[in-house]
Image (cartoon, rainbow, N blue to C red):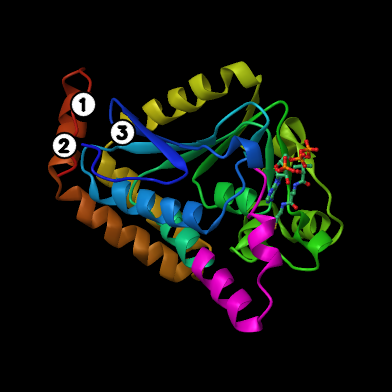
Amino acid sequence: MQDVEFKHFKLEVEDGIAIFTICREDKLNALNPDAWDDIDRFSDYIEKNDGIKAAIITGSGDKAFIAGADIGGVASMDTLAAIHRTSSDTQVVLTKLENNRKPIVAAINGYCLGGGFELAMACDIRIVSENALLGLPETNLGILPGAGGTQRLARIAGIGVAKQMILMGIQYTGQEAVARNLAAMCVPQDQLMATAKKMVVRMTRKGPLGLEFAKKAINMSLDTDEKTGMYIERLSFALLLGTEDKKEGTNAFLEKRHAVFKGR
Ligand code: COA
């Protein structure tokens, strides 16, 4: 099934779940341009591969999920055109990931800073370990979070939290992140992957088309007025009513058995 190569990420597939791990431990998994390309390829891979039902993104080692974009690369960017290009490229990569058909969980195992936190915010659900530290320290470097961070953070946790994290550089531990709606759950580090897998398995038991359309409708709710959003929801509902999955789901309930969805 694995027909794609990655420079800095390792891909494992277990029971239809793709586990994507960044492996730059010596640099606390900082994202260089090749790693951003890997993320984009991974996005395409899970989008197009019918055997993949959901994905987990994590970092290797027990110290960092991702400690941000690679600062060496940022330091060498000195023209406005280069900076603008990079920001727009990383925004495109993460927006594509955010709108992937499949659900994606970020399993955050330590430092989750800058571009790492921006990547985690483009995932559907975030689970953090107790030693996690979430932050957007770009203003320390004289820049700002340029991969969608200003927009996603304000939408996920509100403008107040966004301003505290970006303007004041406040960083939150795992427990604090849950309290501020930045993550769904905080667990001891040795339980992180098992918890992430359990969450993903729970989603993979649902009808995949229902998940896909629900995810799109929820994501679009942030960009549309309520009336338009309701219309998108109604149209999605009408489409799903005609699917084999809907027949299987309702029949399975009435026949008191587990549904076997085929995504059709
Ligand atoms: N880009 C490039 N390299 C990074 C990096 C980043 N974002 N974050 C960490 N590294 C590298 C360090 O340079 C160091 O490399 P070296 O051993 O070759 O010198 C290695 O990873 C280990 O990091 P170190 O700083 O020694 O670990 P620490 O435990 O003392 O500190 C952090 C951890 C996360 C607090 C610190 O590394 C840090 O502040 N990183 C930058 C975070 C950031 O600003 N991210 C946003 C970037 S836009």
Element type at mark 2: loop
- Between circles 2 and 1, the one closer to the viewer is 2
Compared with residue 106, is residue 68 higher up or lower down, i.e. above or below?
Answer: below
Q: Nearer the viewer, residue 14 or 34?
A: 34
Identify the residue at image location x=64%, y=37%: 26
Mark 2 vs mark 1, CA separation in Å: 10 Å
Chief SS of the magenta region: helix
Q: Position of residue 204 (x, y in %)?
A: 33, 32
Q: Amino acid at mark 2?
A: Lys
Q: Residues within 10 Å of mark 1 (few under 14, many from 20)?
A: some
Residue at numbered disc 2: 262
- Name the residue type under label 3: Lys
* Residue carrying label 3: 206
Label 2: few (<14), some (14–19) or many (≥20) C-alpha neighbours in 10 Å: few
Rounded to the nearest whole Å, what is the CA distance between mark 1 and mark 3?
A: 8 Å
Q: Are marks 1 and 3 in contact (CB under 8 Å)?
A: no
Asked if residue 57 is positioned above or below residue 195 in the image, the reply reads below
* Residue beneath disc 1: 259
The residue drawn where x is 74% and y is 61% is: 159
Ligand 1 lies under 8 Å from the Cβ of mark 3: no
Q: Which residues are magenta?
A: 66-90
Kind of residue at badge 1: Ala
